[in-house]
Amino acid sequence: MATAVTVPHYSESETLLARLTQAGIDASQIRFVINSHLYNDHCGVNRFFPQATVLLHQSEYDHAVGMMDTGKHGYMRDDFCGDGQTVEMIECDDSYDIFDGSRLRLLSTVGHTPGHQSLQVTFPSGRQFVMTGDALYTSRQLATRQPLGLVFDKREALASANRLADLGEKGATILIHHEPGIWSE
Ligand SMILES: [Zn+2]
């Protein structure tokens, strides 16, 4: 359905399921699916992980479902979860510890959308990564702390950009989903 509004530029071998196979991981081993937000370029393969729990901010889900009838939105209801899939709704508090003493932690980075979230990953070595979703689009936005572009709430988006930039200054590697230069490194 997403191809109605965006044209994917992936080959079959570059899709998420293919990448997992290449990494030796069976999709059935995946315990959690985390979407930064529900725009169709950030979810849509949730149903291929039927055993996994989808972690969503309640406010993102409510907003996405509310937008379904407006005619102009980036949300596709069928993308959110498969039939019978477990979806755990999380209140938009400051953070959500997924497991093992904050090694995987959800950060509330609302602004781009009402329930946007980022994922903080801390390895046993202490090395830390933060996956920003669309709370930031580019490295320039990280450097200037200015989240321009499509923004639901500008003040919230600014606070989230600052939060992510602060984590970067403390040593976390900030992974910005739409910044190809970061991924090639
Ligand atoms: Zn996006």
Image: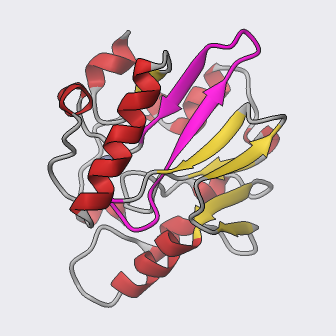
Which residues fall within the magenta stretch? 111-132
Closest to the observer: 170 or 175?
Answer: 170
Q: In the image, is 106 to the left or to the right of 138?
A: right
Q: Quadrant of the N terminus?
A: bottom left
Q: Is residue 49 placed above or below 72 in the rendered structure? A: above
Q: In the image, is 148 to the left or to the right of 161?
A: left
Q: Is residue 129 magenta?
A: yes
Q: Is residue 55 placed above or below 158 in the rendered structure? A: below
Q: Position of residue 26 (x, y in %)?
A: 76, 34
Could one spot residue 155 in this view of the protein? yes
Could one spot residue 176 in this view of the protein? no
Closest to the observer: 130 or 72?
Answer: 130
Q: Quadrant of the C terminus?
A: top left
Q: Residue furthest bottom?
A: 69
Q: Position of residue 94 (x, y in %)?
A: 58, 54
What residue is drawn where x is 70% and y is 18%?
A: 123
Q: Position of residue 124 (x, y in %)?
A: 77, 15
Q: Is residue 15 magenta?
A: no
- Tally the marks: 0
Q: Position of residue 3 (x, y in %)?
A: 29, 59
Which colour style is shown?
secondary structure
